[in-house]
Image (cartoon, grey):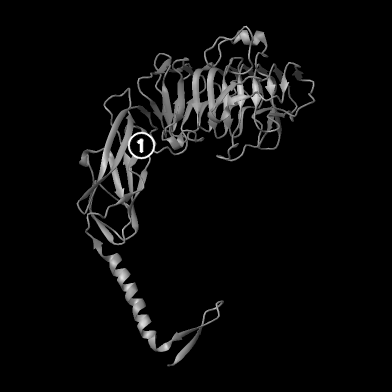
């Protein structure tokens, strides 16, 4: 018998019977052909069923006419032979608010969809909702029905839907600052709480002397990049209550978007806007919570109380030469700063909590700037210093705390007044020397951990043993005696937005 010598590298020599080579080659190719033939054969067995990556697609609250995000699931053929899906259709037929797309093809029904052995296809679904009850979410459900070899299988589709008021610019989709202007009659334009209000683009109150009133319990949802703009001479009055706060947030309500920052732009109190009031509100997941520009008068640009601003991708509160007063507020978890005071101005904060744990869990990147920032000027485009006095930046009975070593940023590089004062505050800071403008009180607690109850779930009450407990200035506490829980302070006063 003749042999041909072959080599298996790394395993020494091996010998192969040359005369039987055709037999082995034939056996190899027959095996390949058998497997290919088996895979290309379509099974008709009733025991061959489909597999699904999800048996339920859930769409969280969807606004009428706006549509929803896309949901997707995978249909798998886990058999060793191809399978033919006789039909895929919505149980609600063509009247269903759900729309489907199978592997890139949109239709209300499909037939004879073949999936090769051990392969899969993708199914996409969206929904448009037209609920009958405008004040409560409607529950809509349907199913996708798959017929295969006499088997009927289902994937359920569920959605909650809401009717809403819509504010859409004339240019849509908005390109740049495309405006829709609030009509003002009799000096007031009012938003009631009977339905949600959904804002696209820039929504502007530009009528001098007009007050934009938002009733207690109103829910405001803002689309990507949306802005509420208050013009020169106009004002906004957010009139929430403890029982019925006003909420501002993005219009994506799926669970994945609940804590996602940067979903809309800002509430912008532009230059010349005065007497703006925000009471009992929650402002969340935008870029800037509230921006207040210079008004050039002795009037307050903004008074805000019992309000939570959180989860902003830039600033919680941004003052630019403004006059601002806050009490019993929480501003938390902002990428740049919770409160920034640029270009001078007057700022007064009483019984407020500023807490910034942005990026502690590495979800959205790290924060590298102090959570409080104060400066007294800017440099023009011509590289000329422009001093703007900080006439007052007063913090009374406030908590300023986060994970950075320095949470108070002071920039007094310009030749202007730089007056700031912390009284009976819990502060995270490295500052141990203070300039002549700084009125330092020994009643502050420097670098003492306030022992927040649970910052991970935005609970900024303080726990037992906190230096904030019962150490607030009683005069300030009595002046702003209703805390963010609606509790009356006294006879002792805890530092921060919550009495205990």
Hey, which residue is sitting farthest bottom in the picture?
A: 1
Mark 1 Cα-neighbour bin, 10 Å: few <14, some 14–19, many ≥20? many
Q: Nearer the viewer, residue 92 or 176?
A: 92
Query: Residue 270 location in percent, x, y?
Result: 54, 25
Q: Which image quarter is the N terminus in?
A: bottom left
Q: Nearer the viewer, residue 214 or 299?
A: 214
Hey, which residue is sitting farthest front in the picture?
A: 1
Residue 299 versus residue 111 in the image, above or below: above
Q: Nearer the viewer, residue 407 or 450?
A: 450
Q: Is residue 109 visible?
A: no
Query: Residue 203 location in percent, x, y?
Result: 44, 28
Which residue is the site of mark 1? 59
Q: Secondary structure at mark 1?
A: strand
Q: Which image quarter is the C terminus in?
A: top right
Q: How many marks?
A: 1
* 118 sits to left or right of 249: left
Q: Is residue 268 visible?
A: yes
Query: Residue 401 location in percent, x, y?
Result: 65, 27
């Amino acid at each position: 018998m003749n042999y041909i010598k072959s080599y298996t590298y790394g395993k020494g020599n091996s010998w192969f019977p040359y005369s039987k080579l055709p037999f082995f080659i034939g056996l190899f190719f027959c095996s390949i052909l058998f497997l290919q033939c088996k895979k290309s054969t379509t099974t008709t067995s009733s025991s061959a069923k489909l597999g699904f990556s999800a048996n339920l697609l859930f769409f969280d609250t969807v606004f009428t006419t706006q549509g929803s995000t896309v949901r997707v699931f995978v249909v798998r053929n886990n058999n060793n032979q191809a399978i033919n899906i006789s039909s895929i259709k919505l149980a609600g037929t063509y009247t269903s608010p759900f729309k489907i797309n199978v592997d890139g093809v949109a239709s209300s029904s499909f037939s004879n969809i073949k999936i090769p052995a051990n392969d899969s296809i993708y199914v996409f679904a969206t929904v448009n909702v037209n609920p009958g009850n405008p004040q409560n979410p409607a529950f809509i459900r349907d199913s996708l029905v798959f017929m295969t070899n006499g088997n009927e299988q289902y994937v359920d589709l569920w959605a909650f839907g809401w009717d809403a008021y819509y504010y859409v610019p004339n240019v849509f989709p908005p390109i740049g600052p495309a405006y829709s202007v609030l009509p003002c009659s009799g000096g007031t334009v009012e938003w009631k709480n009977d339905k949600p209000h959904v804002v696209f683009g820039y929504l502007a109150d530009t009528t001098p002397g007009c007050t934009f009133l938002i009733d207690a319990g109103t829910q405001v949802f803002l689309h990507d990049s949306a802005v509420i703009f208050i013009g020169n001479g106009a004002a906004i009055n957010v009139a929430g209550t403890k029982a019925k706060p006003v909420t501002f947030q993005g219009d994506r309500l799926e669970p994945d978007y609940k804590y996602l920052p940067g979903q809309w732009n800002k509430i912008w109190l532009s230059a010349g806007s005065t007497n703006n009031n925000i009471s009992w509100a929650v402002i969340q997941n935008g870029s800037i919570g509230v921006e207040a520009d210079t008004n050039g008068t002795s009037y307050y640009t903004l008074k805000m109380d019992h309000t939570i601003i959180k989860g902003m991708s830039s600033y919680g509160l941004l003052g630019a030469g403004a006059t601002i007063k806050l009490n019993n507020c929480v501003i938390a978890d902002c990428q740049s700063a919770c409160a920034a005071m640029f270009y001078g101005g007057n700022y007064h904060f009483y019984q407020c909590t500023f807490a910034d744990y942005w990026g502690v869990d590495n979800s959205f990147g790290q924060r590298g700037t102090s959570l409080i920032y104060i400066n007294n000027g800017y440099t023009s485009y011509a590289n000329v210093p422009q001093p703007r006095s900080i006439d007052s930046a007063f913090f009374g009975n406030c908590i300023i705390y986060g994970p950075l070593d320095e949470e108070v940023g002071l920039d007094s590089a310009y030749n202007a007044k730089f007056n700031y004062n912390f009284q009976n505050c819990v502060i995270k800071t490295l500052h141990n020397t203070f300039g002549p403008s700084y009125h330092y009180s020994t009643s502050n607690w420097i670098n003492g951990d306030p022992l927040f109850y649970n910052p991970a779930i935005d609970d900024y009450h303080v726990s037992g043993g906190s230096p904030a407990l019962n150490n607030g200035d009683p005069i300030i506490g009595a002046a702003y005696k209703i805390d963010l829980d609606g509790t009356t302070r006294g006879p002792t006063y805890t530092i921060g937005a919550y009495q205990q």
